[in-house]
Image: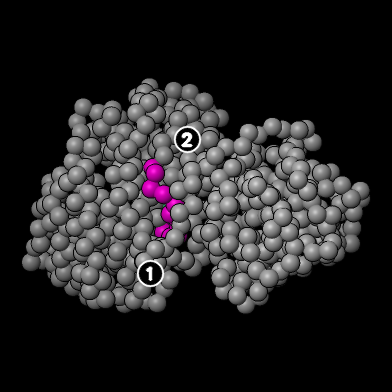
Amino acid sequence: MCSIIGYLGNSSAAPLLVDGLGRMEYRGYDSVGIATLNDGKLLIKKGVGKVAQVSATLNLKEMIGEVGIGHTRWATHGAVTVTNAHPHFGCKVGVVVVHNGIIENYHVLKEELVKQGHVFKSETDSEVIAHLLEHYWSLKNDAKEAMINTCNRLIGSFAFVAVFDDSTLCGARYDEPLIVGITNDGYFVSSDVLGFLKYTDNAIFLDNRDIVMLKGNTLSLFDFDGRDVVRIPTKVAKELGDTDKGLYAHYTLKEIHEQKNTINKSIQQNKESVEKFCNLLKGGKDVFITGSGTSYHSALLAKYILSRYSKLRVEAIMSSEFQYSSELLDKNSVLIAISQSGETADVLQSVKKAKEKGATVLSIVNVSTSSLARLSDCSLEVKCGPEVGVAATKSFTSQIAVLYYVADTIGSNFTGITTDMAELSTAVEETLRLETRIAEVAKEVKNAKDIYILGRSIHLPICLEGALKIKELAYIHAEGMAAGEMKHGPLALIDKNSVVVVLNPNDSTYTDTVSNASVLKSRGAKVISITSKCDPTYDYCIAIPSIRESLLPFVEIIPLQLLAYFLALYNNIDPDYPRNLAKSVTVK
Ligand code: F6R
């Protein structure tokens, strides 16, 4: 949830670090800090705010030195303040560190270090790493020993990068990602390949318990026991680095529009991988499907699709709850884990649980080099390109496209994702042209305090996903609900201030949904319909194209994404960086 980066080489470190942090800002953006080593002295600058803003105010790029580290923070321990921002150091500035993760035993370690005379400045768990490194470094001035001893004291999840004042740059990884980028004249160590992909596609993905030590031209790799380890560098797909906003005002809007190509791209899968995936899936006695947030909504939709079209009995469980509902999992079970980043802690924990029980793990990920992809028995890539906007948009439609494709490969009934792709692409383009209409509707309801989104059947996961978009982008309370459930209680909430959106395409759910909507209308609610057949019940209709029933979720989510986007703009919120959120949630 924080991003960390280090550089050691022949170039000036600070501009490279600032640039890398900017590209990884999706991981956290409440504060920023850089440290560089110049003439044996470590200099630190940090501030509260986003990378560009802090960099401009503190002239971060002008910091001198050819070795350095940087950090963007997503606060877990301690408020958003300059003192809590990274890099951290011990009592003297002989070694500085940036950390991503959570140190669970930091209270115990802190108490021990305080007894030894260490003085702590921040409220963060990360600062204990700095004091431990300082302690071990002061004993022998041996960076390798200091790293090994420190790592062996830490409990929790961590990736950290440290600079010692003898010009050694080190990184260590346990349950948080850390990747080494090798350029012609130096090295990066970073949370995400995006941190260095502009300069090199030659990368080493560290494993758990790996430590990398860089000094001069030498790279050494060893584990927490000090044993040498060998990791083969791999080439990373360059297109992962394509993170420009282009002509769009926001990444979120750009990524919503990219769906006209990404859905199609997602079903261009390698046939052998899909076959392997489907064979493993069919071989399972029970099938569980998991994900968090938006990816959980993909899982919910997949449950409908896989049972309807592939005749598979599937249970969808949100990843943060998976550990409490996995009793039935055994070696004959299959778990499908869905994740855009492939680094979500809750998802990885579910996968570990499934592996402990001997189950087969399949995954659907956007980042093919992620921890999830590497932990899986078989993984399919969604191929929608980097998603920078914190709210998931194009990754959702790509995830479901892959799941539909899997359903078609297994099933005897077809969803239509392959046969009707041309029609679907046209429908997506037509839906994107509704932008002006959606902006008008958003203006009408921009002051809503509560928005309910209702639908039936395969439209229900889209209601949940639409509500999530409105909550995170526009900070408006929104709830997705089964249209038929309103009358069983929530109807008591409806009055003339309520705004209701109904997903009411002209399909098998049409008539029942219209009558649910008219009950709400007669209680005073303002009702917006996303529909292919407008009914006089509705105050506003957003007219989506008619398309095969199974494919409707693709064209229904786009108006909801755009509605959330415009509600954010009308409420003066930056949709790319919603408050309190980070794109990659690597804490439990
Ligand atoms: C919502 C959103 C989050 C993520 C969730 C899982 O817009 O972005 O709810 O969907 O944190 O992330 P991944 O898919 O990376 O596992």
Instruction: Tell me the magenta residue range.
Output: 382-391
Residue 507 visible somewhere in the drawing: yes
Q: Is residue 388 magenta?
A: yes
Q: Quadrant of the N terminus?
A: bottom right
Give, as a three-letter code, the residue at label 2. Answer: Ser
Can you tell me whether the CB of the residue at mark 1 lies under 8 Å from the nearest atom of ligand 1?
A: no
What residue is pinned by disc 2?
326
Above-or-below relation of 144 to 247? above
* Residue 526 location (% of width, % of height): 20, 71
Q: Residue at position x 51%, y 53% from top?
A: 584
Magenta stretch secondary structure, dominant: loop
Q: Are marks 1 and 2 in contact (CB under 8 Å)?
A: no
Q: Residue most toward the right?
A: 139
What residue is pinned by disc 1?
249
C-alpha gap between disc 1 and disc 2: 44 Å
Q: Secondary structure at mark 2?
A: loop
